[in-house]
Image: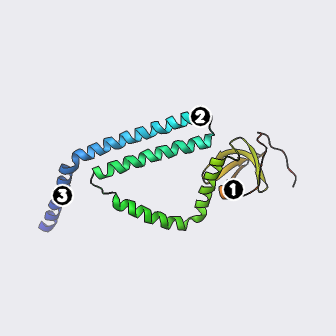
Amino acid sequence: MEQELAQFTAIYAQIVAYLVEYSFQIVGAVIVFLIGLFISRRVGALILALCKRKNLDITLSRFFSSSARLTVVAATLIIVLPKIGIQITPFIAAIGAVGLGAGLAVQGLLSNYSAGLSIIFTRPFVVGDTIGVRGVWGIVEEVHLSHTVLTNEDGEIITIPNKHIVGEIIHNSQADTLLERTV
């Protein structure tokens, strides 16, 4: 019983020492993190509003907005973590190694994302266009990094992986109406 009490006292002393040494830094880190989250939301909303004002495509606007938000949050974490005593250098090395392994494991998924970036930046079609790809026709409802969502004349929702769109012949009527097609 005395040994367990001694271990508990030692752990308690370590926790108290940590809080005494890092308490102001922890409070400061929490404040900086909350400010970073607030700034990331504001930057994302500002970029989205700017893109809308410049009449950019909604998909591209959302992509820029969310990318800016993630960048601000990542920068905030890089600033905050060392303040609370967490060294980020080993994490960055580990993230690089895990990223390489994951990249090799999910090559098929990554091809969808790279195809999605190609669609977003080259814009062969935009939301509202009527397109046909690989024998499937529909109105473009949403373009995501991994897939594109269409609706056909029957109201069915069609999800096409972006890797099946890039490199294919795309029929784009740029109109909001669908025609019955006989194949």
Q: Amino acid at mark 1?
A: Val
Residue at x 60%, y 33% (from the top left corner): 54
Q: Amino acid at mark 3?
A: Gln
* Front-most of residues 181 and 104: 104
Q: State whether residue 120 is above or below residue 46.
A: below
Horizontal side, residue 181 vs residue 85: left or right: right
Residue 97 image offset from top left, x and y in percent = 44, 66
Q: Which residue is mark 3?
A: 14
Q: Amino acid at mark 2?
A: Lys
Q: Distance of mark 3 from mark 1, alpha carbons? A: 58 Å
Residue farthest to the front, as pictured: 122
Q: Distance of mark 3 from mark 2, alpha carbons? A: 53 Å
Residue at x 61%, y 43% (from the top left corner): 59
Q: Earlier in the sequence, mark 1 or mark 2?
A: 2
Q: Earlier in the sequence, mark 3 or mark 1?
A: 3
Q: Earlier in the sequence, mark 3 or mark 2?
A: 3
Crowding at dot 2, Cα within 10 Å, few <14 / some 14-19 / many 20+, comes out as some
Q: Which residue is mark 1?
A: 166
The secondary element bearing badge 2 is classed as helix
Horizontal side, residue 47 vs residue 1: left or right: right
Figure label count: 3
Image quarter hosting the C terminus: bottom right
Residue at x 54%, y 68% (from the top left corner): 105
Which label sits on residue 119? none
Q: Which residue is mark 2?
A: 52
Mark 1 and mark 2 residues within 8 Å of each other at the beta carbon: no
Q: Distance of mark 1 from mark 2, alpha carbons? A: 26 Å
